[in-house]
Image (spheres, rainbow, N blue to C red):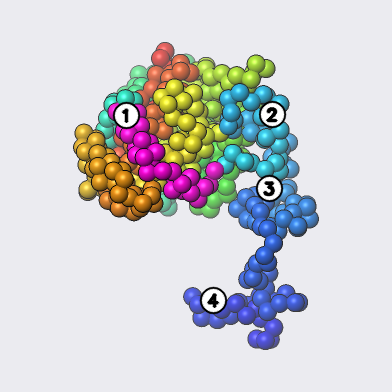
Amino acid sequence: MEERRCKFWLPKKNRFCANLPLHDSLFCGNHNPRSNGQWIPCPLDPSHSVLKENLDWHVKRCPLLKQVQSLTLQPFYQKGINAGRDNEEEKVEDLVAINKPGSDSLDNISSEMKRRAVYGMSAPDFCKLIEKIEAVHGLICKDIRDSYKMPEACNVWMKREIDRKLPFQEKHVIQQASILGNLEEFGVLKNAIGREQCDCEEASDDEKNGVSAVVEFGAGRGYLTQMLADCYGIKRVFLVERKSYKLKADRSLRQKESLILERLRIDIEDLNLNAVESLRGSPYLAIGKHLCGPATDLTLRCCLAEHFSQDSVEHCSANRNLRGLAIATCCHHLCQWKHYTSKKYLSHLGITKEEFHAITWFTSWAVDADHGSDLPEVPDVKLHLESIENKECGGDASGVEDIVRNMKAVERAVLGFMCKQIIDMGRLMWVKECGLETEFVKYVPSSISPENHLLIAKHTNQF
């Protein structure tokens, strides 16, 4: 029997794989060496790849097929509704063609493509880009303040007066509490005193809590919403997440008396929130903790955009049911020009599509090491960038790759954080154009998380 086993050695288990080998190979299907053919992501589930020559066969048998077919029948599914478009002048019919299932997306620029483009720049052009980043950052990123909140309402979590079966990691609890504390300070959520003042039988959930429902985008296991329900008494919960997770908060949330929970397993890009029947007409709060890369832009467009009219122009407006939003951004290196909400604003600042992709690539430098103790304050940023320009851009360096290699880690980190803030401030300006009152803050110290920026917004006539 041992001879019939796959010959792939598993060092952690100190044995060979126990699966049977393929009839024409020494290895099983999981460990058989890949052929030299072209491997492409499965159009139903990009987390796995298939040979291009086997694609037609695979899509008829992919385990995700039934789920995809079921999803497409949902009234709130609309392929690519929140995707945006690479060129603002594209016609609506072109946008529809781009977003057809199975169509090749030429708009997603990989990190490797961004890196090659940056290293392909001349040294003078690279230094001009750094100067532009510094100038834009100094112009639009002046009012980012520290706002570390620990609201009294969240003491039940901080003191662990909750179900002991719920996972507790202090750094995540601190982040969640500060997000909710900033929403409370901003006037979107009401604390216990505010709720008691409205605690009468005639008062609606909207009057008691400020909002009657919460939609968490990129919800993962849903523990930000769990804290919101535990500490602020939210009674209607919608969790939007395209992946399936174990150890979700759903079980604990469903045990709460009178709480209504609905999990929408869908990509934010394809979610028409206005078509969710159980949410229609209800005031709601939109939240998201660490919405990776373009997921932030997709969420903003999902909540605020009126999408594309017949004149090919995307309009945005303050959705009358959206009471407020709080989005903790992250993973800016994944951002794409096509999805980005504030292309027009950055273009007015002189930033091109190619420069935007370079800026997104620089953002990875902000979090590629622990810079919590050695990052300079914003007033010192100019000195660091001037040192780059004086040392590396004077003509002695042989190319951009050498310039990057000779930069100190702290210099790369400073530039990375500046690029992150430029991207996020552009988003803030787009939300402001939609008619909301906005603020952009650092909601936890860098020692808790280097991804520590929070975009919050609300209607000006909140209550």
The Cα atoms of the two marked residues, 2 and 4, are separated by: 49 Å
Q: Which residue in the protein does label 4 denote?
A: 10
Q: Dot 2: within a 10 Å radius of its alpha carbon, few (fewer than 14), some, or many (20 or more) residues?
A: few
Numbered disc 3: secondary structure: loop
Residue 379 screen position, x and y as percent: 21, 33
| Mark 1, other Cα within 10 Å: few <14 / some 14–19 / many ≥20 | few
Furthest toward the front, the residue is: 395
Q: Nearer the viewer, mark 2 or mark 4?
A: 2
Question: Can see residue 294?
Answer: no
- Cα distance in 3D space between marks 3 and 4: 31 Å
The circle on residue 351 is none
Between tags 3 and 4, which lies in front? 3
Q: In terms of depth relative to the viewer, which is nearer, 198 or 346?
A: 346
User: Where does the magenta region start and end?
Assistant: 109-138
**Dot 2 corresponds to which residue?**
94
Above/below status of 184 relative to 240: above
In this view, 245 is above or below 453: below
Find disc 1 in the rendering and name its residue: 135
Residue hosting label 3: 43
Q: Nearer the viewer, residue 101 or 352?
A: 352
- Seen at 66% across and 71% down, the residue is 32
